Image (cartoon, rainbow, N blue to C red):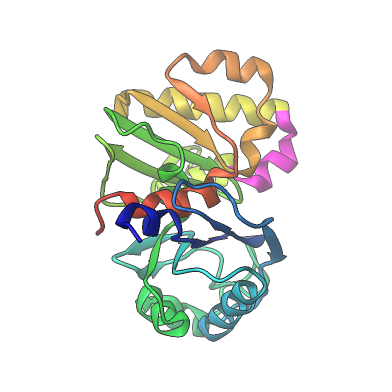
Amino acid sequence: MSSAAGHEKTYTLAIDCGGGGIKGSVLDATGTMRSAPIRIPTPYPLSTKLFVSTLLDLASQLPAVQRATVGLPGMIRHGVVITTPHYITRSGPRSKIVPELVGQWENFDARTTLTKAWNMPTIVLNDAEIHGAGVIAGAGLELVLTLGTGLGSAIFDGGVLAPHLELSQAPVRWGLSYDMYIGDHERKRLGDALWSRRVARAIDVLRPVFLWDRLYLGGGNARALTPSAIARLGDDVVIVPNTAALVGGARVWQLPQQ
């Protein structure tokens, strides 16, 4: 068998872990899905042990693979969780923080733990970084923002992933962080029209900070942006489908590894 043929038969388990749900699928080396995505509600309270067993159970319902990619919210550095915003809470986003869970998740080596549990190579990155791997062109400075429970972000320069920044925790207005300002809680409170204006305003604030060549807006809430807000964003902003969160699970293996 040629090496090219072997590459074509490399299948990736891609799992996207969010505040409200965890979804997974199997993809071939090009990023084409080879199984229908499975989604389950994120269980809370979520200990690291329950997290691993949840991912193992999800994977057991999908076809066999040779490698795995997992996207997590928060600051993930070299596969280690430095901080994560939702999984340290009692019942999910905006609920009470549980000190015991804070201790479990801080410096949790997710990559090593999952590599051993699955017995196969595993990449663990911030979920927005994996989302970005599914959509970037690989030229110029490309910023990826994902609109979901909160705000996810990733920066690529010439297709190379930059060190992660928790932009979601930066203040934007009235002392609110981006997570609080344009997160899902505010979308539900304000309605799509007013929330979309906030997103457009946030992008106006960020444009002179990053001076991107292309900005990709993804995540589950990108589809809630109103046409008038999208028209205001400019030609350097592209709305991308949320399926990129899984497609990137295969394509991220083509990037220089951290």
Picture coordinates of residue 246 (x, y %)?
54, 52
> Closer to the camera, 108 or 100?
108
| Position of residue 209 measured from the top left corner of the image (x, y, whole percent) | 30, 29
**Residue nearest the viewer, comparing 67 with 193:** 67
Residue at image position (67%, 18%) is: 227
At 26% from the left and 27% from the top, the residue drawn is 140
At a point 47% along the width and 54% down the height, the residue shown is 249
Residue stretch in magenta: 183-192
Q: How many labels does the image show?
A: 0
Let me know if residue 169 appears in the view: no
Residue 103, percent from left and from top: 43, 82
Work out whether 77 lies above or below 131.
below
Q: Is residue 250 left or right of residue 21?
A: left
- The x, y position of residue 89, in whole percent, is 59, 72
- Residue 168 can be seen, yes or no: yes
Which image quadrant: the N terminus? bottom left
Q: Which of 64 and 220 is in front in this view?
A: 64
Quadrant in the picture for residue 53 = bottom right
